[in-house]
Amino acid sequence: MLGALAVGLGPLILLLVLALLTRNAYGAPYRIVRVLQITGGLAGGVAAVPLLRDMPWRRGDGPLSRLLGSIAFGAISGWLIARLSFDLLARQTATQVRIALVPYAVTSGWKNCGYGVAFYDNALQARLTVCGPHWHLPQQPGTGTLRVTETTGRWGVVLNQVSVEAHP
């Protein structure tokens, strides 16, 4: 039982470490990256079946629900590990510092963030939404111009500083 618990906690600890190492890093939205993330999820789902067969489940769970639970846990863990690994690759390969002025709009927040700030990142060629309070960005006015300092590389960007440049 202890071995099964260690197998279940291993991916969670790896996810925590990767999440800490990839703070403010965003991987490039390449198609190959998305394919490898999905492959990581599929591999995690398949690998979890034999690894989690001794995991203690609720007493009333049947074999099918245990199988589906193992696959779901493994697939989510595998996909997140692949995604965070590419974010870590973006952090490790980013070398060129870039400063850009970009328009922004305040958006609704999420669980741990009261409001978001969305802008289009030209280096990443994607829309980013960051947590406004984390970067000390004001909620009012709802639009304006941001000064974004980032380190860019082939595999993504790392946000170094985001500040308000001008209000409308």
Image (spheres, rainbow, N blue to C red):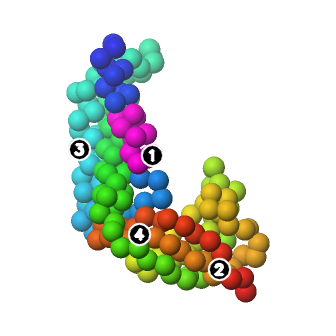
Is there CB contact under 8 Å for labels 2 and 3?
no
Q: Quadrant of residue 27?
A: bottom left
Residue 151 numbered mark, or none: 4
In the rendered image, the quadrant that contains the C terminus is bottom right
3D distance between C-alphas at marks 4 and 1: 18 Å
Which is more foreground, mark 2 or mark 3?
Answer: 2
Which is more foreground, mark 1 or mark 3?
Answer: 1
Q: Position of residue 101 (x, y in %)?
A: 55, 83
Q: Which residue is mark 1?
A: 20
The residue stretch that appears in magenta: 11-21
Q: Quadrant of residue 109?
A: bottom right
Q: Which residue is mark 3?
A: 43
Which amino acid, mark 1? Leu
Q: Residues within 10 Å of mark 4 (few under 14, many from 20)?
A: many
Which amino acid, mark 2? Glu
3D distance between C-alphas at marks 2 and 3: 45 Å
Which is more foreground, mark 2 or mark 1?
Answer: 2
Which amino acid, mark 4? Thr
